[in-house]
Amino acid sequence: MELRVRRAVEARRETDPDPDDAFRGLYLTEEAVERLLDAPRAFPPPPRPLPPAPATSRLGSLARDFGLSTLDVDILLIALLPDLDDRFEAFYGYLNDDVTRRRPSVGLALGLCGMPHAAREARARLAERAPLREGGLLLVEDRDRPFLGRSLRVPDRVTAYLLGDDTPDPRLADVRAPWQAVRGVGDPAPLARFLGEPAALVYLQEDQGGAGTALAASALEAAGRGVLGVDLSRLAEDPAPAEAVRCLLREARLTGAGLVCAPVDAVARERPGLLRALTDLPLPVTLVGRLPWDAAWSASPPLLLRAPRPSPESRAALWRESASEDTPLPVEDLLAPFLLTPEQTVRAARAASQRARMEATPLTAEHLRQGARAQNAAGLDRLARRIEPTVTWRDLVLPPDTEAQLRELTSRARHRDHVLGTWSMRPGGGRGRGVAALFAGDSGTGKTMSAEVIAADLGLDLYTVDLATVIDKYVGETEKNLERIFTEAAGVNGVLLFDEADAVFGKRSDVKDAHDRYANVESAYLLQRMESFDGLAILATNLRANLDDAFTRRLDLVVDFPVPDAPQRLQLWDRTLGPNLPRATDLDLPFCAEAFELSGGNIRSIAVTAAYLAAEAGSPLTMPMLIHAVQREYQKLGRLTLASEFGRYADLLCGGGHPAP
């Protein structure tokens, strides 16, 4: 190539009247115009054809993989020279007759290749759909200039590749994803055979905690290809997504990789054009998402497969491989309540190890749970109130049968993968692997606290949703609000508590007007959505009789919370006052338990009010303070303050109460 350029410079100097003119290229003299008219610019023929690049060299691989002709390779090398040897900047400036234009023009490149400027076949090699430009190997710039005057440039990534540098294109730093092959997530061999084809298209539909990206990466590696992961949510936010897709195509072809793109849900509704651009790429592309396949996403049909969930054993093995230290913890049992993808499992293990190193302690079960909870998406926090559980089974005061049902519920959540997955105990019907329960009882009987205890036992966060705030007077908006909650909950490992469930799950009635019809639609929609939910959902209601029978049939457990009896109330009084609040010797908790028929929530409220009175007085809690707090709670509830109910402490009632007999 250097010999060609030297011959062109020599030929130019023979017809150059004043090569030392400092203003050359800025004006045309009459002599120069006459010379152009009499002898149009011409290049000497190439001294000899370039030898083909060795097939094992990077240039040879580039020519083979991108379908480049001999002329394409010549043009690519001409455009590449200024990036390899700065002398060619001056040469090209001289040959362009413009010292400011230091890259070859289209006309100069064709001339150096010995091709006439008007040759149709030669010009076609620089068209937009030609291999050089479609593959992103060559950029034609200065589009406002005539075709022959446009500059040619080789992207830096292509130059680096030809020089032996495999560093990924910095342009893709914000859209690349670290999808990796993982053992134990299914047999990748059948999929690998399909991905060995030049333009294979696959869609892997997965549920929460699925291993779609890991399976796709494993199959590509088994097919002898590299893996180029694409985060579709980041690609949708890219300011120039079409350019990013072109860079992805070039990077994949340079490295012999296939694309693994996830999650499809992030772009399917708002940016379907991105999916069409990706599915049209001439290389193996695997899409992963939770939505059913839409034929409008691609001109050609994909191979449709269901991505498996990693088994508890493979999740535990992956966690141990990713942790920085060996641990005797029962990892399989501790991870059982969490639906984690392989990538989330790796991150959870690293987060747990970091936490243990920061605290300078051995790895504990709490570290493991914290690492797993850290993988939750943040979208549900905008739709529900997140509670980090702080109570345990010891804090509950419930009848034995009620507590036994709650423990059965945690057992279902812990072993659902084994029972519903390995044993297939819930086949057909489109039902998910979720667990749904109803907590029914009066206000303050411990429904929310029990949900918090279950979340703490499983190591999960608790998210509370007030269904009364989801109801919308406009038709269809309630369903949209509910779908938004369930969609966000699918990316969270937590316990979902729906409060005031009867607001939506009421009995379906006969249709007498439009209001009845749409109310029934809301209930029917939520019944169907509950069945397909994969998480742990608890619904709380004060009015069990108002719930639809079809809804209760779909529940795994219905737990009744009765009003506590006297012995249970005594335990509640003692536990709510706690060990830190100073108590006077006259405090008569057995009397309070026998005399006042209150729920646990009311007793807690009384205890807090009494504590404030003690703090104001600067003394231990006394019986008059406690009676005063009970009276205030009665007033809040709208209950009569009967002297007979307060017995021998009736004289402690203040002005709002009845006088003692």
Image (cartoon, grey):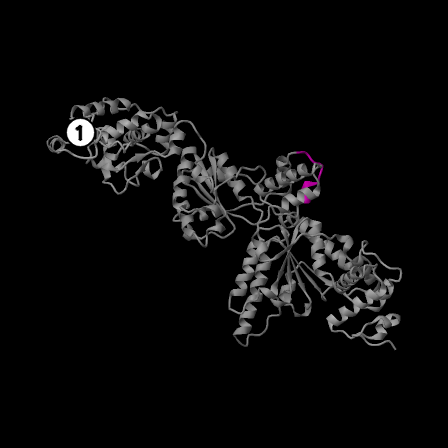
Label 1: which residue? 42
Local SS, label 1:
loop
| Quadrant in the rendering for residue 478 | bottom right
User: Whole-percent x and y of residue 116?
Assistant: 19, 32
Residue ID at (53%, 41%): 215
Task: Read off the magenta span.
Answer: 325-334
The residue lying toward the viewer, choosing from 375 and 275, is 375
In this rendering, position of residue 658 left or right of residue 480? right
| Quadrant in the rendering for residue 648 | bottom right
In this rendering, position of residue 212 left or right of residue 397? left
Residue ID at (68%, 34%): 326
Residue ID at (51%, 69%): 474
User: Whole-percent x and y of residue 489?
Assistant: 58, 54
Amino acid of disc 1: Ala
Q: Is residue 639 above or below residue 185?
A: below
User: Whole-percent x and y of residue 393?
Assistant: 76, 53
